[in-house]
Image (tube, rainbow, N blue to C red):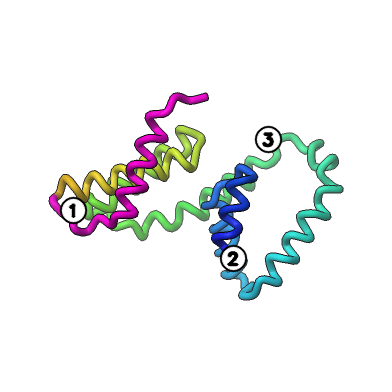
């Protein structure tokens, strides 16, 4: 179901990572069936009626909640093996580039590139899966394209 959501989300210009995280959050809260997603979808459709009211709230009012979400996300950083350069450098590149480029895609792409190149440079090419090389190629092309 996640893959269908990622495909449909791509057509709607939504990040597939966002869809995956939302799905994982639902499962973490106990939603193990597709019925949870159906109810969430119905609630979102009903929320369309409230969108004019939500537009009255200034963007600055959402900052505290975003700061708290960022804080909760940063608690996972302690689990990164910082003594292993092959893991720490790509994680650091990803963590830094996401907020500075205002793009999850840019951060993840740079992390993919850094991880794959570090594996190749350190002589551990056998650990690089062919799909990872495909992702590396796709992200290199993405970064080489001019910004529209």
Instruction: Find disc 3 in the rendering and name its residue.
Output: 60
| Label 2 vs 3, first from the N-terminus | 2
Q: Relative to the observer, which residue lies in front, 84 or 139? A: 139
Give how far apart the Cα atoms at labels 3 and 1 are.
Answer: 47 Å
Q: Is residue 103 above or below residue 36?
A: above
Horizontal placement of 144 versus 60: left or right?
A: left
Secondary structure mostly taken by the magenta-highlighted segment of the chain: helix
Please state the horizontal and vertical placement of residue 109, each as a whole percent of the image.
39, 42
| Label 2 vs 1, first from the N-terminus | 2
| Label 3 vs 1, first from the N-terminus | 3
Instruction: Find disc 2 in the rendering and name its residue.
Output: 1
> Where does the N terminus fall, quadrant-wise?
bottom right
Instruction: Find disc 1 in the rendering and name its residue.
Output: 125
Q: Is residue 73 above or below residue 107?
A: below
Residue at figure coordinates x 50%, y 38% from the top left: 103
Give how far apart the Cα atoms at labels 2 and 1 are.
Answer: 33 Å
Residue at figure coordinates x 62%, y 52% from the top left: 8
135 magenta-colored? yes
Q: Relative to the observer, which residue lies in front, 52 or 137? A: 137
Chain part drawn in magenta: 123-148
Horizontal placement of 91 versus 13: left or right?
A: left
Mark 2 or mark 3, whichever is nearer to me: 2
Please state the horizontal and vertical placement of residue 136, each as a whole percent of the image.
33, 44
108 magenta-colored? no
Give how far apart the Cα atoms at labels 2 and 3 are.
Answer: 35 Å
Please state the horizontal and vertical placement of residue 115, each as a whole percent of the image.
28, 48
């Amino acid at each position: 179901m996640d893959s269908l959501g990622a495909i449909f989300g791509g057509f709607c210009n939504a990040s597939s990572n966002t869809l995956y995280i939302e799905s994982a959050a639902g499962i973490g809260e106990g939603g193990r069936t597709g019925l949870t997603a159906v109810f969430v979808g119905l609630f979102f459709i009903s929320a369309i009626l409230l969108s004019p009211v939500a537009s009255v709230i200034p963007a600055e009012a959402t900052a505290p909640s975003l700061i708290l979400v960022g804080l909760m996300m940063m608690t996972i950083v302690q689990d990164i093996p910082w003594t292993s350069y092959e893991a720490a450098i790509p994680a650091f590149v990803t963590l830094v580039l996401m907020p500075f480029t205002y793009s999850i895609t840019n951060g993840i792409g740079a992390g993919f590139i850094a991880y794959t190149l570090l594996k190749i440079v350190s002589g551990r090419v056998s650990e690089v899966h062919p799909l990872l090389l495909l992702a590396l190629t796709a992200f290199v092309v993405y970064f080489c394209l001019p910004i529209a």
